[in-house]
Image (spheres, rainbow, N blue to C red):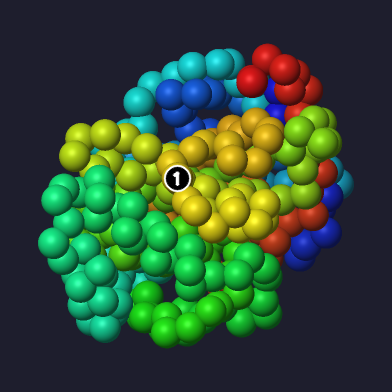
Amino acid sequence: MISLDVTRDCRDDAVLVAPLGLSTPDVAPVSLNIRGGSQRVVFDPGCGQGAVEVVPEADHISFRWQFSRGGADYPEAMFAQRDSRYTRAATELAGEMRDIVAGAAHQTEALQRIAAHVTALFQYGHVEKRFYEGLDEMPQLCGLTRGSCVDINAYLIAGCRAVGIDAGYVTGYFIPEEKRTSCTDMHCWVVTRADGIVQEWDIAHHLKMDVREIAPALNPKPGVRVAMSHSMGRNFPDLDVADLKLLAEPMWKLKGGSWERAVLDIRLDGYDALL
């Protein structure tokens, strides 16, 4: 069970918006119980995913997801090209990616070249201003750049899609082996489909382990993960939300359209059952 407890520390007119959970071939949600507010489900029609809007009625809102091992294949909608500034490759980036994959014998080789190139561009870390902030497309990087899992994966997806390789963005929670019962925030990874073969990539975890020879792997860093949603550039017409960067964990939506991060306590019960 994944449990999230959210402290009501926002304005009285704020509502909490949270993903419902995503089934993957490894782990799937089977139930969600929410306490502390009235709820309704809204949908992103472009990717078919739902989210829950919670109007607080208490000082704490609790989410309890029950998960089981094994689930559905990654959804086809995850690989769809969404017209989002977070995954739209700039002309220079697209041209560079075409040069990188030129002469590759097949998509699998092209993908490995792109993954190696993206890895060489990044040093793992968090920054105050991301390299694509305020831009309408993913820019070309020309030197070593500090970035989080979000930044690295957005760049990888933009690069893959620029040369016609299917790539999807997955967000959720990663509980490391050394903790087993908790994590501090969301995590994300990339799923690709080259030559009809589905593979998962986590460049950020490779870099955190000081490994720069990248291979597809769900958990290069020991631990378990559960998925909450997919795709960047989320749209929820009923909430008047367009091109939301991502929805990985509950967030406060303020009147007027701005967002604030929620204070979360994230816990896992049943680590061994998800291995």
Q: Is residue 211 above or below residue 102?
A: above
Q: Looking at the rendering, in which quadrant would you find the C terminus?
A: top right
Residue closest to the eye, 201 or 257:
201
- Point 39% across, 43% down: residue: 191
Classify residue 261 as left or right of residue 25.
Answer: right
Classify residue 105 as left or right of residue 259.
Answer: left
Q: Is residue 80 above or below residue 63?
A: below
Classify residue 192 as left or right of residue 246.
Answer: left
Residue 251: tell me if it is visible: no
Q: Looking at the rendering, in which quadrant would you find the N terminus?
A: top right
Residue 146: tell me if it is visible: yes
**In x, y percent, where is residue 206?**
58, 51
Q: Is residue 113 above or below residue 67?
A: below
**In x, y percent, where is residue 227?**
54, 36
- Point 36% across, 48% down: residue: 168
Identified by mark 1, the residue type is Ala
Residue closest to the eye, 163 or 82:
163
> Which residue corresponds to mark 1?
215
How many residues crowd around disc 1 within 10 Å: few (fewer than 14), some, or many (20 or more)? some
Q: Quadrant of residue 74?
A: top left
**In x, y percent, where is residue 224?**
65, 31
Residue closest to the eye, 69 or 247:
69
Q: Is residue 250 above or below residue 113?
A: above
**In x, y percent, where is residue 194?**
24, 43
Q: Quadrant of residue 207?
A: bottom right
- Point 61% across, 82% down: residue: 129
